[in-house]
Image: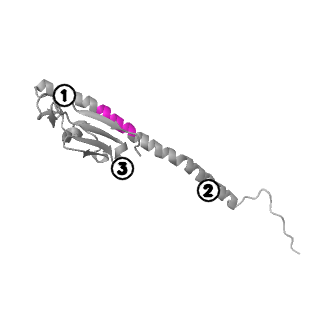
Amino acid sequence: MISREPPHPLKKRAGFTLIEVVMVIVLLGILSAVALPRFVSLRAESRAAVMRAISGNASSVFTGVFAKAAVQGVQAQPSASVVINGTTIQLKYGYPALLSVMDVLQIEPLSSFSLVPLSATSGYIAPSGVTNDATCRVVFAEASGISSPATMQSFLSDCR
C-alpha cells in the first residue's frame, strides 16, 4: 500500500493565488483613479504657467521694442520697423505690430503655440492642444495711436 504524505509546510509555492492577483488589480485601479486626475491638473497648471510667462515676457519685450523705436525716433509713426538681433520687427506707434508678435517673443518651439488673429489689429497666442482656447490665451492689441499703447490681457481660467 502506498501512503501519501501531506505537503511539506515549507515547500515553495509555484505562483500567486487568484485572490492575490485580484487584490493587486483592484489596488492598481484605485491608485490610477486617484493619480490620473492629479496629473491632468498638473498639465493644465503647467500650461497656465507657460502662458503667464509669455505674458510677462511680452510686457518686458514690448517695452524694450518701444525704447528701441524711441532711440531711432520712430515711436510716433503709425508704421515703421526696427531691427533687433537681426530680426526686422514691424511697428505700430513704436510697439510691435500683430504679425511681428511671434518674432519679437521668440517662442520655441513655434509648433507648440499659435497666433490667432481676432481682427486686423488684435489677436491671441494659445498653446496647441487646449480644449478651449478662449479660457487659455494671451490677447494682444496693436497700438492705435501715440497715446494708446499696445495692450495685453491674459485669460487663463482653464488650460486643459
Residue 154, compared with residue 26, is above or below; it is above
Secondary element type, mark 2: helix
Q: Nearer the viewer, residue 22 or 3?
A: 22
Which residue is farthest bottom? 1
Q: Nearer the viewer, mark 2 or mark 3?
A: 3
Q: Which residues are magenta?
A: 48-57
Q: Residue at x 73, y 58 (%)?
A: 12
Task: State how far apart marks 2 and 3 are (Cα).
Answer: 32 Å
Residue 18, compared with residue 60, is above or below; it is below
Task: State how far apart marks 1 and 3 are (Cα).
Answer: 32 Å
Task: State how far apart marks 2 and 1 are (Cα).
Answer: 61 Å
What residue did someone put label 3 on? Answer: 129
- Please give the label number shown on residue 25: 2
Q: Is residue 17 visible to the viewer in this orientation of the structure?
A: no
Find residue 9 and report its horizontal and vertical position in percent.
80, 57
User: Magenta includes 104?
Assistant: no
Query: Identity of the amino acid at label 1?
Result: Phe
